[in-house]
Image (cartoon, grey):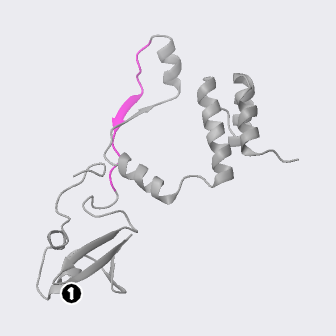
Amino acid sequence: MKKTPIQLIEELATLDVAALQKRYAAFFGKETPCAHRQFLFRKLAWHVQAKAEGGLPASALELAKSIALDTPLRIRILTNAGRQRAGKPLDHSCTTTIEPAHDARTPLPGGLIVKQYRGRTHVVTVLDDGFQYEGCRFSSLSAIAFAITGTKWNGYLFFGCTKEKTNGRK
């Protein structure tokens, strides 16, 4: 009889660190450098649930990516864990940021930009390599603003995308 996700998680809760490390290796196909029981249990339980329920929705992944943009990250090489326990300085650490792959003033690909202009609602879809408006592909927002108004506009200004956004906030 196949076990339900709840039964599998309850079973994981009863295991010790060595057994959790074995389950981790079997599930992920690699040894874990971690010996923290709670971390191993939570990671395995999350993946059991994600496998049964389908994982994170696309909207949650998009939110996580937008939060991660421009956030300083501390990257630590695994050997530093042993150095830290021994009280030695962490020689192999560095700080970096994730550079955004697109202009931060526009939504991520798949997002929409909505503009009310002269009593009409104009909806633009953001694509990986441009924009789509009324079934046509455009390379810039300025080209769409020109198609709507008949005059040259800065596309970001016309659509109200003028302020740089950081982590989803103005």
From the top left corner, tell me how far across and down residue 46 is, in percent: 62, 41
* Residue lying at 24% horizontally and 53% vertically, measured from the top left: 165
From the top left corner, tell me how far across and down residue 15 is, in percent: 74, 26
Give the side of residue 76 with respect to residue 136, left or right.
right
* Residue lying at 48% horizontally and 30% vertically, measured from the top left: 77
Give the side of residue 34 with respect to residue 69, left or right.
right
- Residue toward you, 132 or 84: 132
Give the side of residue 114 with respect to residue 23, left or right.
left
Rendered position, 108 above or below 24: below
- Residue toward you, 74 or 5: 5
Instruction: Tell me, yes or no, if residue 137 can be seen here.
Output: yes
Q: Which residue sits furthest front?
A: 119
From the top left corner, tell me how far across and down residue 79 is, in percent: 52, 24
- Residue toward you, 77 or 71: 71
Q: Which residues are magenta?
A: 88-100
Give the side of residue 55 with respect to residue 58, left or right.
right
Q: Which amino acid type is shown beneath numbered disc 1?
A: Ala
Dot 1 lies on which element?
helix
Q: Is residue 56 magenta?
A: no
* Residue lying at 72% horizontally and 41% vertically, measured from the top left: 6
* Residue lying at 20% horizontally and 86% vertically, measured from the top left: 148
* Type of secondary structure dominating the magenta stretch: loop
Rendered position, 6 above or below 139: above
**Residue position marked by numbered label 1 in the rendering:** 147
From the top left corner, tell me how far across and down residue 112 is, in percent: 34, 70
Q: Which residue sits furthest top?
A: 87
